[in-house]
Image (spheres, rainbow, N blue to C red):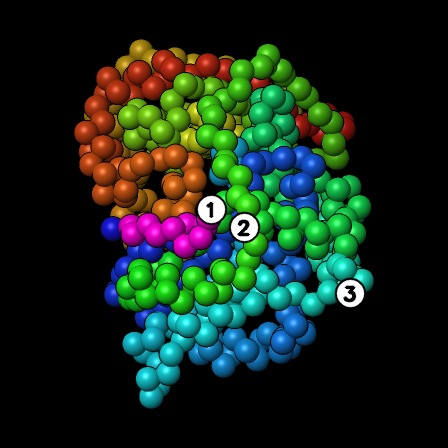
Amino acid sequence: MIHTISLAPGVTLRCFPDSRFKQGCISFQIIRPMNLQEAAQNALIPSVLLRATRNHPDLRSITHKLDELYGAAVSTVVRRVGDYQTTGLYCSFLDDRFTLSGDEILRPVLEFLMELVLDSPTENGGFLPEIVESEKKNLISTIESQRNDKRVYAMDQLFRLMCREDSFGLSRLGEKEQVAAIQPVALYEHHQEILKQSQIHIFYVGHAQPEQVADILRPMLARMERNPVDLPQQTPFHTCPGENKTETMEVSQGKLCMGFTSPITNRDEEFAAMQVFNTLYGSGMTSKLFMRIREQLSLCYGIGSGFYGSKGILAVSAGIDFDKVDKTKQEVLALLEDCRQGKISTEELEAGREAVLSTLRATHDSPGSIENYYATAALSGMKMTPAEYMAAVEQVGLSDVVACARSLCLHSTYFLKGATE
C-alpha cells in the first residue's frame, strides 16, 4: 500500500513499506513538462550532480562515501512519462536491519542524496566547467549511440512524425546540438530555478515507516526555496495529419515502423484489454505478427509491437529486406483486420492474458521494479495497483480485445532503407 505525505510545497513523498528485501531504495525526481528548450539541460543535470559535492569534490571521494554506507549505489534518472520529463537520482542501499552493530544507513543515505542535489561545488556562479564538459561529451555519446542503433533510431523517427504537435515526439535526452551549447553558469542557474519551481516526487521502498522517512527529509528540504508551479494534466494523442516517410542510409537491413493511434490510454478502463490485445497481436514470440510474418512467411528478421499507454499509441517495428516493405505492411494490416473480425483463438487470448499477468506478477520482485511501477503510474495518471491491474486483465474477454483492435487507426509509417537496393 502506498503512503503519500506532503513534505513541503510541491514536494510529495510516496512510501511503499516492504520488509521482504535486504535492500531499500529511494528516488528523487524533478518533474517538468517535456519542453524542447530545456530537455537537454534537464537530462544533463543529474550526471553533473553525481560527479561532486562541496564535501566530496571528486568521484573517488563519492565512491569512498558510498562504500562507507555499506556499498550504497546512486545512479541518474532521466525518464519520459507522457507529457513529462522526470530527472533526478536513484539510490539503493542496505536496510538498517542488516547492518553491523546497529549502524544506521537510512538517515546518512538520505543526507548524502540531498547533498548531491543541493551542494554542488561552483565556480564563477556555475557548475565546475570541467565536470560539465565531461558530462556533455558523455550525453552526446549516448545520443549518438541511439542513432547508431537503427531499430531505436527508426522508432524515434516514427514518433517524431506522429507527434509533431505533441511533446511525446521529443527525445527525453534532448538534441545533440542543444547539449553542445550548454554552459556551466546557465546550467547551474537552470538547476536552481527548477528546484524552486518544479513538482518534486520522492519515492521510498523499504522497511522504515513512512513518517520516519518524512521526519528525516523535512529539515533537509527546508533549505530549499520553493515556489512550485502546478503541472498540466497528462493529455492523449494530439491529432495531426499522418505521414509516410522513407529515409535512405547506409544500412544492410531495412527498418519498418508503423504507428497506430487509439483513444484508449492507461487512464481508461479499457487499458487492461488493450495490453492483452497488444500482447496477442504483436508482443512476443507467440503473437500473430511473429508467427505469421516471421515464422510462416519469412518476411522479416524480427517483428514486434508495443503500446504506449500514456498517449494511446501502438507501434509495430520490423527488420526486413528492402523489397519486402509493401508485403509486410499488407500483412500487418491484414492481421489487425483479423483481430477486428474476432479471428482470435481461445488459446491466443489465454496466452495474451497470461503474458500480461506474468509481467505484473514480477512488479513486486525488487525494490527497483516497485519504484518504477508506482512512480511512473503516479505521473502518468494510471490509478490501478498491480493487483487491480491483474484483476482487470483476468476479466478481459474476446469482445474486449476486438473492441480495442477496432479502436486502432493507422496514422504514420517510417521506413529506413539502404542507399543501394
Q: What separation in Å lies between label 2 and label 1 (alpha carbons)?
A: 8 Å
Please tell me which residue is depicted at 73% across the width and 65% down the height of the picture: 122
Residue type of the residue flagged with mark 3: Glu
Residue type of the residue flagged with mark 2: Arg
Discs 2, 1 touching: Cβ within 8 Å: yes
Instruction: Residue 180: give x, y in percent of width and height.
Output: 78, 47
Residue at mark 2: 226
Q: Which residues are magenta?
A: 2-12
Which element is circle 3 on? strand
The mark that comes first in sequence, 3 or 2, is: 3
Report crowding for label 2: few under 14, some 14 to 19, many 20 or more residues within 10 A (C-alpha): some
Please tell me which residue is depicted at 71% across the width and 40% down the height of the picture: 175
Residue at mark 3: 123
Which element is circle 1 on? loop
Q: What separation in Å lies between label 3 and label 2 (alpha carbons)?
A: 24 Å
Please tell me which residue is depicted at 75% across the width and 50% down the height of the picture: 186
Looking at the image, is 70 positioned above or below residue 197? below
Residue at mark 1: 10
Is residue 4 one of those drawn in magenta? yes
Residue type of the residue flagged with mark 1: Gly
Q: Quadrant of residue 98?
A: bottom left
Q: What separation in Å lies between label 3 and label 1 (alpha carbons)?
A: 29 Å
Please tell me which residue is depicted at 62% across the width and 66% down the height of the picture: 119
